[in-house]
Image (cartoon, rainbow, N blue to C red):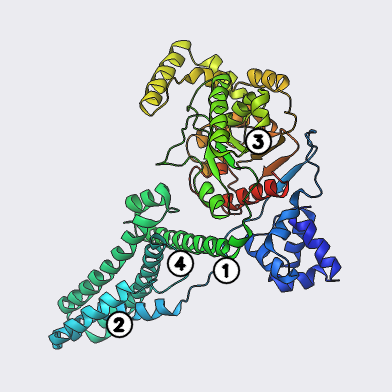
Amino acid sequence: MHPGQLIRKLRRERNWTQEDLAKRLYVTRQTVSAWEKGLAQPSSQSLLAAAKVFEISLSQLMGDGAADEPASTAPVTEQSAVTARDGALPVSFAWWPVAVLAALVCLCANSYLLLRQRPGLIVAVIVLFLTANLLPGWFERAIPTSRLRVCFHGTRVLQVFTLSTAGSVAAQAILGALLLPGQWELWLWSAGFAVVVNALTFWNGMLSIWLTSVQLGLHLRLMGLLFGWIPVFHLWILKQMIRVTEHEVRFETGKHLLNLERQDEALCRTKYPILLVHGFFFRDSRIFNYWGRIPRELERNGANIYYGQQQSADSIENSAEELKTRIRAIVKDTGCEKLNVIAHSKGGLDMRQALLDPEIRAMTASLTTINTPHRGCAYADYLLEKIPEPNQRGIEKAYNAAARRLGDRDPDFMAAVRDLTKARCEDFDRQTPLPDGVFCQSVGSRLSRAGAARFPQNATYHLALHFDGPNDGLVSEGSFRWGSRLLYLTTPGREGISHGDVVDLNRRDIPEFDVREFYVRLVHDLKARGL
């Protein structure tokens, strides 16, 4: 029973209409209806509110997800869509300090004439200016980290700058037109002083968000550098930066408060540890986590995490041998008996191969494949046909050399590529039955347009679309399905969820989808199954 079904059951037990429940949860009746029909998932905020309204724990509201669903390994017959945004609680930061501090900056910026008459006031002006530039955002106690506090400080300073600049333009226009007619030199000094003061405020805010924001990304930073000097367009860029960074702080603060609220629930404390298995082209690294912010979110909610640590590129058979060695080592060192494996992309095929070994099967409680090409990629066959063999050998040689320098022992780029072709994967799928005694499921996602993805998925999206149909930038919808069920992730907006975004590779907050909360629910479902 998914949360929407349980919400419907609890609502009917209390003889409430959908409208009654919607008023209690501060959502629309249509939203409640969508939950109950399974067309959307309640957000974290809504789940918390519903748990309080129904007077049950959050784990009870989320934990029945496996109760009515047999943990069989029969082929699935339908998909599950996740289309609702999760994440931030309604964190509300006061706006009145921005208006007050903007008034102070505006006063300082337009004080040139006053300072000419009373130079002794310069100390007071400097103190007011520094106060207005140092105070924004620092007294919001809910913000959990110093990085976010600096980011929020920068956001608020830029909002102060925007209001102060608007006020300064009006003030200087009045001075030029009414108070200083004919005294253009004096007016230019006054206007120049205002520009300098507001510019200092601007760079205080801009440097703060530039150095601390994750969600600004390379895209907005480059746009600011290249086009920030263009009139009118620079206002649009500034607005976008403020919007992105303010949302980032609200969202991350909401995630922090949500985890504090439910920390006693230990939603992800499964019976067996979690083993995360990476896909093609990447390695597990302490410097750059392949799984982005997901492992930390799972650990905050009680999970015990390990990593596959296999090479970045090799054949399915060789990668499976590495994973078998890793699984044996974890089980021996920890005494955990079994592992819940979550494997992305080619990692899912590597684990399926490993599960052909009865010993590894006995050590595996579940396997969840994430965007795995179980039936291959037709465009891989096409590229291998079209790219001349000397070019293939050149690419292979360059990749393998680079991979060795990064830590791979004996990488084999072309072996990995050939194992992802449609013909090879379809043969592999037929020859690799579902493992007895292991709960198996799959996850897939759809990218809505190439421009919503990062490289290389934005480059391969149309190629995959031509040969395979709707896809995540690399793998088609038809390749995802495997195991007892498929959780198919979509968004109602123009972006969708790419092959990299589904494992938070880009650390990007996607409208209508919270990847970290999805994994919390995924692992909590394993816990509910007793795994």
At x 48%, y 70%, the residue is 142
Give the CA separation, mark 2 to mark 1.
41 Å
Give the CA separation, mark 4 to mark 2.
40 Å
Is residue 376 visible in this depiction of the protein?
no
Q: Is residue 203 left or right of residue 340?
A: left
- The answer to which of marks 3 and 1 sits earlier in the sequence is 1
Give the CA separation, mark 3 to mark 2.
59 Å
Q: Which residue is mark 3?
A: 470
At x 40%, y 61%, the residue is 238
The front one of 130 and 183 is 130
The C terminus - image quarter: top right
Q: Which residue is mark 2?
A: 174
Q: Which residue is mark 1?
A: 90
**Dots 3, 2 in contact, CB < 8 A:** no
**Dots 4, 1 in contact, CB < 8 A:** no
Element type at marker 3?
Answer: loop
| Amino acid, disc 2 | Ile
